[in-house]
């Protein structure tokens, strides 16, 4: 369940920081009863960015499939990756 806090709670930065790191989720900050800010740890932010990158790549792949771009053989792809990175 999302953590929602009033903006006055930002006075206690140590508590907000601890909550961000403990729950690994963003904290939503309200001002006058309305959403105003989102606060999260760097780890959570980086994880969110990585997920956005994955979703972007999946959307690009689905677009390529819809356009009829030929698919690559999975075994060949992994073989080339092993040769490139593991020297096998």
Image (spheres, rainbow, N blue to C red):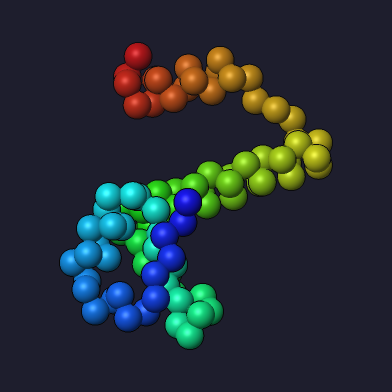
Q: Is residue 19 left or right of residue 52?
A: left
Q: Position of residue 74 (x, y in %)?
A: 59, 20
Left or right: residue 53 compared with residue 38: right
Residue occupying image coordinates x 28% and y 57%: 19
Q: Quadrant of the C terminus?
A: top left
Number of numbered discs on residues: 0
* In the image, farthest residue toward the left: 14
Picture residue at 32% right of the left edge, 21% below the top: 86
Q: Quadrant of residue 67?
A: top right
As drawn, is 72 to the left or to the right of 86? right
Residue visible at 22% across and 71% down in the picture = 13
Q: Is residue 68 left or right of residue 43?
A: right
Residue 29 quadrant? bottom left
Which one is nearer the viewer's eye here, 29 or 38?
A: 29
Name the one closer to the observer, 7 or 43. 7
Whether residue 80 appears in this view of the structure is yes
Outermost residue toward the bottom in this view: 32
Q: In x, y percent, where is residue 56?
A: 59, 50
Residue 36 can be seen in this image:
no
Residue displayed at 39% across by 20% down: 83
Counting from the top left corner in percent of width and height, residue 37 is at 44, 75
Q: Which x, y percent locates residue 44?
A: 36, 53
């Amino acid at each position: 369940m999302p953590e929602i806090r009033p903006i006055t709670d930002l006075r206690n930065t140590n508590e907000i920081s601890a909550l961000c790191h403990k729950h690994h989720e963003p904290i939503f900050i309200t001002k006058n009863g309305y959403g105003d800010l989102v606060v999260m740890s760097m780890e959570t932010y980086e994880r969110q960015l990585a997920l956005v990158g994955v979703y972007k790549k999946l959307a690009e792949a689905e677009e390529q499939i819809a356009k009829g771009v030929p698919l690559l053989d999975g075994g060949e792809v992994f073989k080339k990756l092993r040769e490139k990175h593991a020297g096998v």
